[in-house]
Every structure is written in C-alpha cells, then in structure tokens.
Image (cartoon, rainbow, N blue to C red):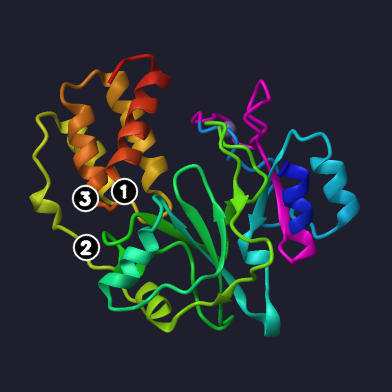
Amino acid sequence: MTPLDGALWLIRHGFAVSPCDHPELNRCAGLHKTCDGSRGKHPAVAFTRGWTLDERKVHETFGRGLRNPAVSVGACSGPGGVQLLVVDSDRPGAIEDVAGARGEQWSTTMRVWTAKGHHDYLWAPSSLKLGNGLGSLQGQFDGDVRAGNAYVIGPGALHATGVVYELEDPERPPVMAPSWLLRALLTKPQRPMRQSSYPRPESRSLQGLVKFVADSTQGQRNSRLFWAACRAAEADVDDAPAVLLDAAVHVGLAEAEARSTIASAFRTVGVSA
Ligand SMILES: [Zn+2]
C-alpha cells in the first residue's frame, strides 16, 4: 500500500486526511521550526484545519508518494455523529493485555499495524470529553490514546524504519468503544509516585529539569523530556541521562521511548548520552 492508496482508502471510508513528512524526503516537511528527528510523523499542515475528504485534493497531495497520510482524529465522525478514538499500542497486544487484566475481552475492530504495535480505531459517543489522556490506564498501558485535537499516522505511510503502516483488514470498520475503556479514560489518573520519591539530583539545575519532566501532562511528556535532556546535555551534568530517564518513567513514558528521546536530545546537542 502506498501513501496515496492509504489516503484514498481513508477518505472513501469517511476519515479526514492530512499530510505529514515522508522519511524519504531530504528534509522533514513538518511545520515545526526544529525537527526532533523522528521522521515521517510531523504534520506538514495544521492537521486540525488542513485536512480533506476530497479525492482530487488527495491525488494532488499524495500522488507523488512524498507525504505520509495522517488521520485528523477530531475531524472524523461516524454513524450518528460518534467521535473517533484511536488506541495506539506500542507493542502488539498491549491493549488486549489491559482488557485481560480487567477481566474483559478486547473486541476486534479496525486496526492499522504500525512499526511498533497497532492503532485500534473505535467510535465513542460525541458527548464525551475525550483527549489524549489515559485516565486510570496511566502506568498500566504501553501506549497512548488519541481523540479530539490529535492525529495519527495512517495506513500506507512509510515509517523511518522502512515499515509500512498496514490495515489489518480493509473491510473491517471501527466498533463502538467498550464502556470499561471509556470509564477508565474519563477517570482522573492517580499519580504513580509522589514527587518527594524522585531521586534527589546532585545539581540544582538538574533538579529543575527533573521537575520540569515530572510536571508534564500526557501529550507533553516526550517533548518536555526532549527539551530537558537538551538543556542537561548542554550543561554537561553528570548522571543527567539516568536521572531524567527515571523521571520520565515515573510520569508514565515507556522506558524504551524515554531512552531514545534522551539519546536523540544528546545527539542533537552533539554529546553522547
Ligand atoms: Zn520533523
């Protein structure tokens, strides 16, 4: 499946599409000023407004194969006005494990296989205020959820590793999200640990950076970690990678993801972590 195939499939099934960077371009096509290096994922337009459902526009944008298709989640609505919710498992079966731990069975739904795991597409009542927050699944789920003001990389997109995002079954539409999941997402998250239990950093400035990471909410975690790691790399603080990694894991980032964010920050600044 090419980016164009994916984008066409999406709009024909009612999913609003917007373009992102493509890893084969020399430079990131993202709108941002500085690229964090995760190529192929950065929006090339304001995804909340720049989406389309128009076939001619999709041909224009994706025809040359140099943009990855993304789904503008908040712009999609299903039967009866339901809103889209995408559950992004960072490893195969992560959401099934969450369901299983609660004595539930995960229903088969529209699924897109990603480089690390899969995106499950679900409908949810439009009256619910869903966002990118994990609610009480915080710390229990290896992944993220996307709803409202959010986007996900779509089928046909090429990941920097060479993996193509693929629909598991092009004939399978999203099902309604189970109520246990919606209840969990709408429950206030419990802070996994109190701030006082963070390791006490040696230097004042590292302490400030740790607090900055520790105070991040869902959706900011990775970017705040990246920023803090850049500052730590510039200041050449001993033990900064290990201490920041700890803080990031405490706020719920997956260890592997946090590690690679820190390494990428140190590379950006030109130091090895
Ligand atoms: Zn970029």
Name which residue lies at 19% across and 60% down.
Answer: 192
> Is residue 211 visible from the viewing direction of this image?
no
List x then y, in percent, for residue 195. 15, 53
CA distance separating discs 2 and 3: 9 Å
Instruction: Determine which of the numbered discs, if any, sits on residue 273 in the image.
Output: none
Residue under label 2: 191
Name the secondary structure under disc 1: loop
40 or 104, which lies in front?
104
Q: Position of residue 255 (x, y in %)?
A: 27, 42
Instruction: Decide: is 25 above or below 189.
Output: above
Identify residue type, mark 3.
His
Segment colored magenta? 10-37
Closer to us: 153 or 102? 102
Cα gap from disc 1 to disc 2, whole angstroms: 13 Å
Other-residue count near label 3 (Cα within 10 Å), few / some / many at <14 / 14–19 / ≥20: many
Gap in angstroms between the C-alphas marked 3 and 1: 7 Å
Q: Quadrant of residue 190?
A: bottom left
Please state the total of marks drawn on the protein image. 3
- Viewer-side label of 1, 2: 1
Secondary structure mostly seen in magenta is: loop
Q: Amino acid at mark 2?
A: Arg
Residue at horizontal 66%, vertical 20%? Answer: 26
Q: Which residue is mark 3?
A: 250
User: Disc 1 marks which residue?
Assistant: 253
Measured from the top left, where is residue 269 in percent x and y? 39, 18
| Residue 79 in the image, given as x and y percentages of width and height | 69, 81
Q: Amino acid at mark 1?
A: Leu
Sequence-wise first label, 2 or 3: 2
For the N terminus, give its image quadrant. top right
